[in-house]
Amino acid sequence: MFFTILGAGYLVYLGLYTILLCVSDCDVQLFFLEKLGKSPRRLKGQVVFITGASSGIGEFTAYALAKCGVKLVLTARRPYELERVKNKCIELSKGSLQHNDVLIIPMDVTDFASHRRHFQHAVNHFGRVDILLNNAGRSQRAAWESIELDVDRQMFDLNVFGVINLTRVALEHFEKVGKGHVAVVSSLAGVFGAPYSGTYTATKHAIHGYYNSLRNEKMGKNLHVTLLCPGPTFTNFLQECFTDKNGQNLNSSVQPTDRRMTAERCGYLNAVALVNKTRESWMAIFPVTLFTYCAVYCPMLFYWGVKIIGPDIIFKMREGRKEPYTVWIRKWYRRQLRLVYYYFKYTVSQKPVKQLVKTQSSIRQQESNYKSLITSWYDFGGIVPQILPIF
């Protein structure tokens, strides 16, 4: 009886968890922290150092923090864009921030030798830095086997080594003052292997390895480490996106019809994660977050799913393209309902399995991998041993 109640409770827990993932645009922990946790306004007066603040997620995270009266250090390669973001931050603060409360520093993250000088400039200006938010980076769209090695090197310099070097500079300051918080905008591509972004995915997995190691090493020393993992977001990242060729940009753009989270919403969720000092936070609209949970907590189910739907559908989902994968899901579910219908129809009527096979011949022609599909979804009632030999 005890185990029955325990099992039923676990099923209810899984059901509620799945429902929350379907209706929210972030992981379950962040969902509750947004509703019941600390407000970003509790960061008022703190100093946050942001790289890649001239556009995209970095820009809108700066806006979310400025609304809460957070003092900002904005860094990027384009000083004119930084000036624009600074003016917008002061405007959004509604008097909480003055001109000297937002410092802009033109900075190239791949110029490792300049990191210490720029960070010390921020410390000298404000007297301290409380949070380092590494956001600078670029994405990629390319077939794995065609990526040039120079592209790999450039992406690791920008997405990994620049982040790690600046973090080590910040750690020296945090250890002197006895506290600190380092965060990095990673990606859901750092949680599972995203197709057609081999180098980008590798850089994000590397960041997770570095930061998880740092967190465990500094446990109990008043140093907090946060990994921020957004999914598809409405930003201009595709314009500067790496491809497989050295010196070549994708020069593409997101479409208004894409299923993506807004950069404003992503920036606000970043602020929620920072004030609550989460270890790792995921941000994406349905079904990307649910898909990621499946990849982490149900790896075999994830493997079967990828094998069935193929990498192209996953790529479309990641790109926020609505039509291809939603149409496929509807068709897939209709096929599952037909299979269940035929199973009960022919098992209840006790008709030979050959009639079932004949009836479903057209379905089998459409799906070359139905063997794994039947095995994974309909391994009950003794029907699998009867059907598998015919494939």
Image (cartoon, rainbow, N blue to C red):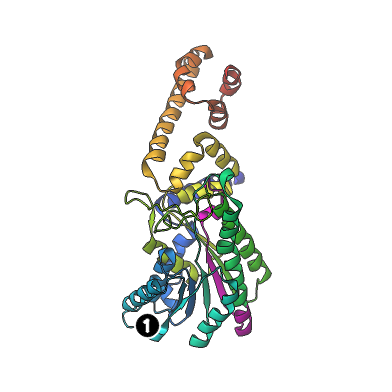
Q: Farthest front residue?
A: 247
Estimate the x, y position of residue 146 in percent, counting from the top left: 56, 44
Q: Which residues are magenta?
A: 172-196
Q: Is 189 a magenta residue?
A: yes
Whether residue 191 can be seen here: no
Nearer-the-camera pick, 101 or 354: 101
Q: Quadrant of residue 378?
A: top right
Q: How many marks?
A: 1
Estimate the x, y position of residue 254 in percent, counting from the top left: 37, 52
Residue drawn at (68%, 69%), measured in percent from left and top?
217
Q: Amino acid at mark 1?
A: Leu
Residue drawn at (56%, 58%), measured in percent from left and top?
155
Q: Is 124 a magenta residue?
A: no
Residue position marked by numbered label 1 in the rendering? 97
Nearer-the-camera pick, 379 or 299: 299
Estimate the x, y position of residue 221 in percent, counting from the top left: 65, 76
For mark 1, give the secondary structure: loop
The answer to whether residue 120 is left or right of residue 32 is right
The answer to whether residue 259 is left or right of residue 8 is left
Image quarter in which the N terminus is found? top right
Residue drawn at (41%, 63%), measured in percent from left and top?
56
Residue drawn at (39%, 35%), measured in percent from left and top?
330
Nearer-the-camera pick, 51 or 304: 51
